[in-house]
Image (cartoon, rainbow, N blue to C red):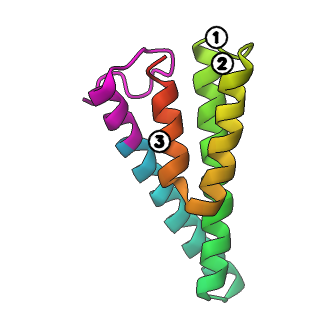
């Protein structure tokens, strides 16, 4: 399930894509929590609104970067449908968190 989790060129089956999804969703969550804690310590502002804004931005960035890495490693950067899916996943991750965005990226790892 977690075989070759850092190899973005590896063609995964459904179970391995689920492992990829869970792993990178957890890493995104950890990155969001660490950034929120650091910014609240630096600014002294620990409001919930600041945390949600940080979470949305981090989810958007990580989903976009991981999606681009998958496309590049799989040599799919010339396919406009897959580029559109990466952009869609980044936009959706801004509005829904990384839950939906990473699901699209996990789907792309099966190609």
Q: Please determine whether, in this image, residue 64 is positioned above or below residue 60.
A: above
**Nearer the camera: disc 2 or disc 3:** 3
Element assignment for label 3 = helix
* Residue at left offset 43%, top offset 21%: 110
- Other-residue count near label 1 (Cα within 10 Å), few / some / many at <14 / 14–19 / ≥20: few
Query: Relative to 76, is 41 above or below?
Result: below
Q: Is residue 13 left or right of residue 34?
A: left
Q: Nearer the viewer, residue 86 or 52?
A: 86
Contact between marks 1 and 2 (CB within 8 A): the answer is: yes
For mark 1, what is the residue?
Answer: 75
Label for residue 72?
Answer: 2
**What residue is at 68 percent from the left and 24 percent from the top?**
81
Q: Which residues are magenta?
A: 1-21
User: What is the C-alpha distance between the residues marked 1 and 2?
Assistant: 5 Å
Q: Secondary structure at mark 1?
A: loop
**Relative to the observer, which residue lies in front, 47 or 34?**
47
Task: Report x, y in % for residue 55.
Answer: 60, 65
Q: Position of residue 97 (x, y in %)?
A: 55, 60
Measured as percent of width and height from the top left, residue 94 is found at 65, 58
Q: Position of residue 70 (x, y in %)?
A: 57, 24
Identify residue for label 3: 103
**Magenta stretch: includes residue 12:** yes
Residue 67, compared with residue 110, is above or below; it is below
Q: Name the dominant secondary structure of the magenta segment.
A: loop
Q: Earlier in the sequence, mark 2 or mark 3?
A: 2
Say whether disc 1 or disc 3 marks the residue closer to the N-terminus.
1
């Amino acid at each position: 399930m977690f075989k070759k989790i850092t190899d973005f060129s590896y063609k995964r089956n459904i179970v391995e894509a689920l492992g990829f999804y869970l792993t990178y969703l957890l890493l995104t969550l950890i990155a969001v929590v660490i950034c929120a804690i650091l910014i609240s310590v630096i600014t002294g502002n620990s409001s919930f609104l600041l945390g949600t804004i940080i979470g949305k931005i981090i989810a958007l960035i990580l989903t976009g970067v991981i999606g681009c890495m998958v496309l590049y490693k799989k040599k799919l950067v010339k396919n406009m449908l897959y580029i559109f899916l990466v952009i869609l996943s980044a936009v959706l991750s801004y509005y829904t968190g990384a839950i939906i965005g990473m699901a699209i990226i996990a789907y792309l790892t099966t190609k």
